[in-house]
Image (cartoon, helix red, strand yellow):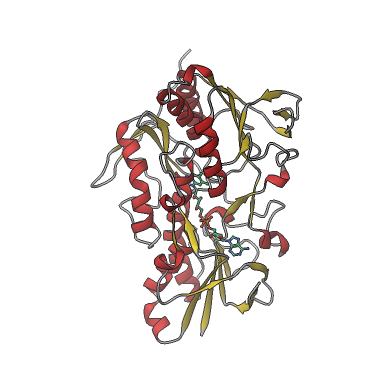
C-alpha cells in the first residue's frame, strides 16, 4: 500500500485530503493507497474572519470556528497530534503521539506569528494597549480594546514581510476609519499605518490605489518603516533608521514563520518557508514531497485563494507522480482577494507571478462581474459571501467557477503616462 501523508488540516491540507479521496476512491477501497492527515488540534479557524472580530462585525469564536473532521473525507485517517520532525531520508514523520512513514508527503502546515522575534513587543503593555488580530485570542482581546477606545493614536505596524494575507493590514486601517466614524469618534482618532513596504501593498498599481483610498480616509501611511524594536513601556515603535511612531493603541502584525517542525527538520529557509518549485509545487529538495499554501516560499501572496488555485494544480501533479510521471509546471502564481475598505464597500485584486493587479472587470458566472481595483458595494457582498463559499465549497475541494490560472478577460491595461 502506498501511503500519502498530509501535514496540516487547515485550508490547503483539507482541500487536498478531499481532492485526493475523490480522485483515488477506488485505490483506497482496494487498500492500494491510504491518505492520512495530521493536525495538532480538532478545530478549524476561518482566518479571514479574524479581520472582522476587532470591529464587532463578527463577535465571537463561533463565527469563525468549526470542527475539522466535518470537512475531512471519511476515507482519510485524521490524526490529532503535534508534528515534531520530518526525516525526509527515512520518509518518516515524528509526532508527539508516535511516528508514521510515508511514500508521498504533502506539507500544508501554514504560517504563524512569532511575536518573540520582535524586540519589546511582549512587554508590560502586551494585550493591554498592544494587540495582534492574526490569532483568535488576539482578535477577541482587540475587540474589547477597540470598544473601550475613546480617542488617541492607533498605529498598525507590519513588523516584517512576508505576512499572510498582505491585504489584511490595509483592510484593518480602512475598517478602523469606518468603525470610529460609526461611533462618532473619528475626529478624536488618528490612524497610522507603518509598513516596511514602500506603500500599503506589495504591487505598485494596487499600492498606489490603496494609498489614494487611505489618504481620502485621512489614514497616515508611514512607508519603509523597518521595525527595530517596540519601546513597550513608552508606547512607541522605533525603526532601524531611528524614526519613531508613538501610539495609544498598537495593532501589531508580528514576524511570521513557517511551522517549527520545518525549522527543526532543517527543511526550510531561516524563517521556515519550504523551498518549493514555483510552478510544479514540488519540494526543490525531495521528489516525494509537495507543498501547498503558506508553507511554500513561492513568490505570491500567502492566501487561502492561493491555496485553492494551487490545489487544482497539485492534485494533477500528485496523480502524475503516483503514475511515475513528471509534474507539470502549471501554477502561475494566481492570487485573488477582496479588500474590505469600510462603509459597506470593498476592492478586488487578481494577479499572478508576472501580472500585477489591474483595473477592469472580473467575470464570475452566476455572481459577477466584480470590479477590479475600485471600491464597490458588490465587492463587499463578495467578501462577505466568501465565508459561505469557504466552508461549503473551498474546503471540500470543489472547483469554483474561477480558473486556477489568471486570465486577462475584463482587465484593462493602464494608459501610458505621457509627459
Ligand atoms: C486576519 C487574516 C485575514 C485573512 N484574509 C484572507 C482573505 O481575505 N482571503 C484569503 O484568501 N486569505 C486570507 N487569509 C489567509 C488564509 O487564511 C491563509 O493563507 C490560509 O489559511 C493558508 O492555508 P494553509 O493551509 O497554508 O495554512 P493553514 O490554514 O493555517 O493550516 C495550517 C495547519 O497546519 C497545522 N500545523 C502547523 N504546525 C503544526 C504542527 N507542528 N503540528 C500539527 N499541526 C500543525 C495548523 O494547526 C493548521 O491547521 C487571512 C489570514 C488572516 C490571519
Q: Residue visible at 38% across and 62% down?
A: 397
Question: Residue 265 occupies which quadrant of the picture?
Answer: bottom right
Q: Is residue 290 above or below residue 169?
A: below
Q: Position of residue 13 (x, y in %)?
A: 49, 63
Q: Residue reaching furthest front?
A: 148
Would residue 229 appear left or right of 311 to someone viewing this image?
right
Q: Is residue 21 found left or right of 207 in the rendered image?
A: left
Residue extending farthest top: 419
Q: Could you say where residue 345 lies in the image, as x and y percent from the top left?
A: 36, 31
Front residue of 247/225: it is: 247
Residue 23 falls left or right of residue 232: left
User: Is residue 17 visible in the rendered structure shown here?
Assistant: yes
Residue 330 seen in this snapshot: no
> Residue 263 appears at what percent x and percent y?
70, 59
Q: Residue at x 47, y 81 (%)?
A: 33
How far across and down, in percent of the image, does residue 143 sit?
51, 38
Compared with 75, 126 (above or below) is: above
Instruction: Name the one closer to the observer, 380 or 235.
Output: 235
Question: In the image, is residue 393 above or below residue 48?
Answer: below
Residue positioned 53% across, 35% down in the render:
169
- Front residue of 159/125: it is 125
Residue 32 located left or right of residue 83: left
Numbered circles on residues, count: 0
Residue 105 against residue 411 in the figure, above or below: below
Q: Quadrant of residue 106?
A: bottom right
Q: Residue furthest left?
A: 366
Amino acid at each position: 500500500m502506498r501511503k500519502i501523508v498530509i501535514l496540516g488540516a487547515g485550508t490547503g491540507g483539507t482541500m487536498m485530503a478531499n481532492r485526493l479521496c475523490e480522485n483515488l476512491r477506488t485505490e483506497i477501497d482496494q487498500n492500494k493507497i491510504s491518505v492520512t492527515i495530521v493536525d495538532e488540534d480538532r478545530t478549524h479557524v476561518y482566518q479571514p474572519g479574524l479581520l472582522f472580530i476587532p470591529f464587532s462585525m463578527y463577535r465571537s469564536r463561533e463565527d469563525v470556528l468549526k470542527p475539522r473532521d466535518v470537512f475531512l473525507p471519511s476515507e482519510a485517517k485524521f490524526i490529532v497530534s503535534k508534528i515534531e520532525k520530518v526525516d525526509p531520508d527515512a520518509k518518516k514523520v515524528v509526532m508527539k503521539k508516535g511516528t508514521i512513514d510515508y511514500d508521498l508527503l504533502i506539507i500544508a502546515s501554514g504560517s504563524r506569528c512569532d511575536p518573540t522575534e520582535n524586540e519589546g513587543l511582549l512587554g508590560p503593555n502586551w494585550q493591554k494597549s498592544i494587540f495582534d488580530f492574526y490569532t483568535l485570542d488576539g482578535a477577541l482581546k482587540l475587540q474589547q480594546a477597540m470598544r473601550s477606545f475613546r480617542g488617541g493614536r492607533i498605529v498598525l505596524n507590519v513588523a516584517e514581510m512576508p505576512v499572510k494575507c498582505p491585504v489584511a493590514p490595509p483592510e484593518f486601517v480602512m475598517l478602523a476609519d469606518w468603525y470610529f466614524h460609526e461611533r462618532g469618534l473619528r475626529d478624536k482618532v488618528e490612524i497610522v499605518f507603518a509598513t516596511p513596504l514602500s506603500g500599503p501593498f506589495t504591487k505598485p498599481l494596487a499600492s498606489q490605489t490603496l494609498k489614494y483610498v487611505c489618504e481620502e480616509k485621512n489614514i497616515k501611511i508611514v512607508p519603509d518603516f523597518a521595525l527595530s524594536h517596540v519601546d513597550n513601556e513608552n508606547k512607541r515603535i522605533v525603526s532601524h533608521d531611528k524614526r519613531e511612531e508613538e501610539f495609544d493603541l498598537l495593532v501589531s502584525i508580528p514576524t511570521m514563520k513557517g511551522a517549527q517542525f520545518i525549522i527543526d527538520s532543517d527543511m526550510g529557509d531561516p524563517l521556515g518557508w519550504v523551498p518549493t518549485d514555483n510552478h510544479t509545487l514540488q519540494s526543490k529538495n525531495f521528489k516525494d514531497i509537495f507543498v501547498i499554501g503558506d508553507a511554500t516560499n513561492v513568490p505570491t501572496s500567502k492566501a487561502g485563494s492561493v491555496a485553492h488555485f494551487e490545489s487544482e494544480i497539485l492534485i494533477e501533479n500528485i496523480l502524475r507522480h503516483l503514475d511515475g510521471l513528471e509534474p507539470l509546471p502549471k501554477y502561475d502564481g494566481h492570487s485573488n482577494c477582496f479588500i474590505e475598505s469600510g462603509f459597506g464597500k470593498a476592492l478586488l485584486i487578481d494577479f499572478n507571478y508576472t501580472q500585477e493587479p489591474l483595473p477592469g472587470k472580473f467575470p464570475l458566472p452566476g455572481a459577477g462581474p466584480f470590479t477590479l481595483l475600485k471600491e464597490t458595494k458588490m465587492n463587499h457582498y463578495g467578501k462577505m459571501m466568501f465565508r459561505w463559499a469557504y466552508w461549503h465549497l473551498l474546503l471540500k475541494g470543489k472547483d469554483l467557477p474561477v480558473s486556477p490560472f489568471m486570465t486577462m478577460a475584463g482587465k484593462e491595461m493602464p494608459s501610458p503616462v505621457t509627459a
